[in-house]
Image (cartoon, grey):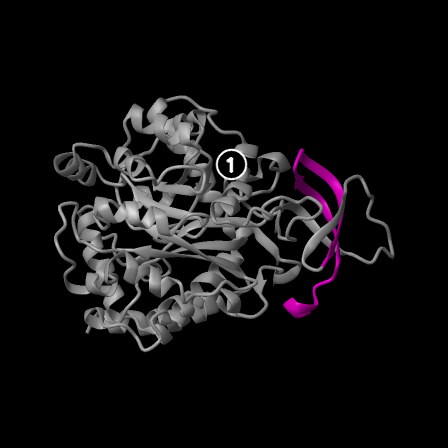
Amino acid sequence: MSPSTAPSRFHCEWAWLADGLAADVLIEVADGRFTTVTPGVPLAAGLDVVWLPGVTLPGFANAHSHAFHRALRGRTHGGRGTFWTWREQMYAVAAALDPDSYHRLARAVYAEMALAGITCVGEFHYLHHGPGGTPYDEPNAMGEALIAAAADAGIRITLLDTLYLTSSVDGRPLEGVQRRFGDAGVDGWADRVGRLAARPHAKIGAAAHSVRAVPAAALTEFARHTEGVPVHVHLSEQRAENDACLAVHGRTPTELLADRGLTGPRVTAVHATHLTDTDRTELGDSGTGVCFCPTTERDLADGIGHARSLTDAGSPLSLGSDSHAVIDPFEEARGVEMHERLHTEHRGHFTGADLITAATATGHAALGWTDAGTITPGARADLVTVSLTSPRTAGCDPAAVVFAATAADVRHVVTDGRVIVRDGAHLTVPDVGATLTDALHTTLTGSLR
């Protein structure tokens, strides 16, 4: 069965619906959307359906990705250091990529995401230009490579094309490989991004890399240029960035963004780790979303953010795999709860339903796909079926699957009504491990030159 000829009827042993978990759910799909969702329909002999044993969830949204960081997995963990020392290794990989090698790597990474149940990715894209910052003949060659890679892997993408102008909060110019990230001011960035076109599987969003990479005046211009589209920004991931912002501007990064018109429901603050109480109130009162990436935040020793207080303040929570130290939506979701337990010494801050919503509906909304992330009539037909009989999930309460399952337990994935993963195998990238190995060999060989 090819992804383009997916059957239109599915019968789920268990399905996570808008009002909770339901048994024996018959789902009908037409034109890539759910048409009917009916619980309590016994599976009968002769019923023309695809049987999905286990728990079927809405498709996951990976709201924060840097695809090329996948090349660093298992290669940057052996020594001491901080985010800043890790960054130098990341820059070596960034220096090695071109549009062709980036497409091969991203195709493999997005196929790995599909195997984990991710049906949509937010790609925080700042690797724009050739060596030394020279634009390619096609100025968006690198972004187009990512859009094509998502199509090849069968998932949707929001390309969060990123403004990156300076190397520090006090405005030092870009240097070394950072020159590949920069444009000729906000107008130059906007002109280039204006040449990108949305596609059925792709939306074009925007990102301001951080307060260290976008000067205050440019943030105001950026806010004007990006009205009406999803906007993401790295926020207070590192204490050093907060200290520099206070020294230069006399304000926290959150206060600076608010001053410059970059808070509100269309904005998602990524990490939001080191915030003051006033910062959390500002984000919550304005409805600014927050995206936590627990596996990366702990891998890079960033610190633990306060997810519960942010959501209580009014900030919608989404999740991302960021540097891809792990690609596993279950690990990201329960990581939010486990981190809260570590810093409060109490359990039970987020329910399973809370975490699934963060990984699905809220993540899709943060990426501009407001018609995805729920199993309801009219929504995009994305399904992720998780085994309840693996060594990890055997005996698990179906309602608590988010606390037990891993990406390895995903058996079937449907995106926009098309089957892209069946019985744990990707239908268009049959050997994802081999594809990753080949793409990573090319990338890593280049980074060691």
Closest to the observer, 280 or 118: 280
- The prevailing secondary structure element of the residues shown in magenta is strand
Closest to the observer, 272 or 387: 272
Give left or right: position of 240 versus 235: left
- Where is residue 314? Give x, y as percent: 45, 28
Give left or right: position of 418 versus 198: right
Q: Secondary structure at mark 1?
A: helix
Is residue 13 within the magenta segment? yes
Above or below, comparing residue 30 to residue 232 in the picture:
below
- Where is residue 120? Give x, y as percent: 51, 54
Residue sitting at 20 percent across and 32 percent down? 251
Is residue 187 within the magenta segment? no
Above or below, comparing residue 337 to residue 46 in the picture:
above
Q: Residue furthest bottom?
A: 137
Instruction: Quickly name the residue at label 1.
Output: 355
Closest to the observer, 122 or 345: 122
All told, the count of numbered labels is: 1
Task: Give the magenta-colored segment's residue range.
Answer: 1-30
Give left or right: position of 215 versus 140: left
